[in-house]
Amino acid sequence: MLLGCKEPIPKLDVSLDERSLIPLPRKITPNGQTFVIYEKTKVYTSTDTAAVAIAKQLIDKIQTAYGYELPLLEEGYATDAYGIYIGLTSNTVGNPNREAYHLKSTSQQLRLTAHHSSGLSRGIQTLYQLLPDSIVNNITATGPSASVLGVPGVEIKDYPNFAYRGAMLDVARHFFTVAQVKRFIDLMGQYKLNVLHLHLADDQGWRIHIKSWPKLTQIGGSSSVGDQGGGFFTQDDYKEIINYAMARDITIIPEIDMPGHTNAALASYPELNCDGIAPKLYTGMKVGFSSLCVQKERTYEFLDDVIGEIAALTPGPYFHIGGDESHATSKKDYIYFIERVQNIVKAHGKRVIGWEDIAAAPLTEGTIIQHWTNPDTASLGIRKGAKVILSPAAKTYLDMKYDKDSRIGLTWAGTTAIDSAYLWKPLEVLTTVSKAHILGIESPLWTETVVTTSDMDYLVFPRLIAHAELGWSKSSDLSWPSFKQRLQQHLQRLDMMGVDYYKAPQLFTASNASPQK
């Protein structure tokens, strides 16, 4: 009988080898013990709001999956008490990173501590991976394993390699609902990603309501690639997404692409065109043919309103202005435009992000560029004082096919198999740039060929999981054989969550399910 408990604790023996940790934590020290969770296990927290919220999240998850509610105590914790402790502390893993956490399980206690709420958010995801796969059930599990859970005895001290670890979801080419975006947030959050970049407007659709320019969604929100229906977020919808992401410590970055990729806006308001004539709505996939009228003051009044409304709704520090593939804009006009728009964004209290193309213009202090295709252009931006987000298309673009036979996807940047998505070195993408200039990695999903949730799952997973490990884990620990083994083990959890991931042949062996396209 253990101290702090009035009855014998169920016995269970679970090895760390039975669990799959992705991304790989920085320091893992097994101790050969097992912490047992059962219906009388108490959950203690510090009195901090963040700690209580994470504790309640754990309790809710266990209740949903296993049908019983663990008791929560916000005070009276004894250091020798049997139970789970979740709390904020002033000293964690000896690292000041806000996402650092310390997780330790023994036969007597399970402790998750961090010095910032972000650390608790990342650490709880590791704890979920230390629990049986059935923790992801949305229907109460049954059977002998449904009441007693084993956490392998281990001490984990962890923090990320890169501060910025993101995914981008294009809701402009095809629209995705609030529920679909929330599901995407939940999935990316499991792998410690911390940024969701929403591509909210493009030639094929305008997806966020702007009160001062309502025709953007009335007209521009009605179309999509292939004319398969439109849609848009109301401002309340957008705030719901923001709040959902914030509760999971994920930052939302809105993008309004400009001055190109703007046909939906041009079709909605003729005055944004130099000739004053609105083009037809566009449902194709061609790029580079549209442009706002750079020399009209009305264009900047429009952008001030749009950026202002979205910035006011967005608590995060960033606003993405796009700036890519503006082939219909002269170089002179493009440079003039990018200079002016940076100042508009800054006036609304946000930090500018743009695709690397904006390096052609002078960059204001604090501007960030996103590398996608041309290392020389990205390096130019860095020489002009910008930080960089790495999204090399051949490695991180989730809309690229896995191989020539993939059922959806594009191939303009090549094909990207799961090993190719993992086997690259972020610090070698831009050879003249130091790590100090690199904020991190982002994985964009452009949705020209993505219509359904199943389509999204197919192209995103498991490649996004590979990118998550590249962004989080220590570079010297990265190993394709290790990742492959852990990912193979993790596939059962994806199956249980209903993720329709690509069944990559290289992940399957004779001992498990046959690969399928």
Image (cartoon, helix red, strand yellow):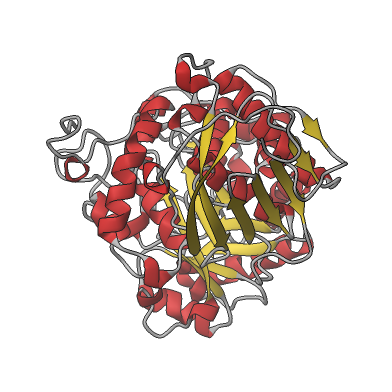
Asked whether residue 398 appears in the rendered view, the answer is yes
Q: Is residue 276 above or below residue 116?
A: above
Q: Position of residue 46 (x, y in %)?
A: 82, 47
The residue at the far front in this view is 1
Left or right of 460, for residue 71: right
Viewport quadrant of the C terminus:
top left
Q: Is residue 500 above or below residue 321?
A: above
> Residue, x 71% and y 67% (percent of image)?
343
Q: Position of residue 210 (x, y in %)?
A: 70, 37
> Residue, x 44% and y 79% (percent of image)?
379
Q: Position of residue 62 (x, y in %)?
A: 60, 27
Q: Is residue 423 above or below residue 83?
A: below
Q: Position of residue 454 (x, y in %)?
A: 36, 27
Q: Is residue 60 above or below residue 447?
A: above
Left or right of 89, for residue 499: left
> Residue, x 33% and y 36% (percent of image)?
491
**Quarter residue 265 falls in:** top right
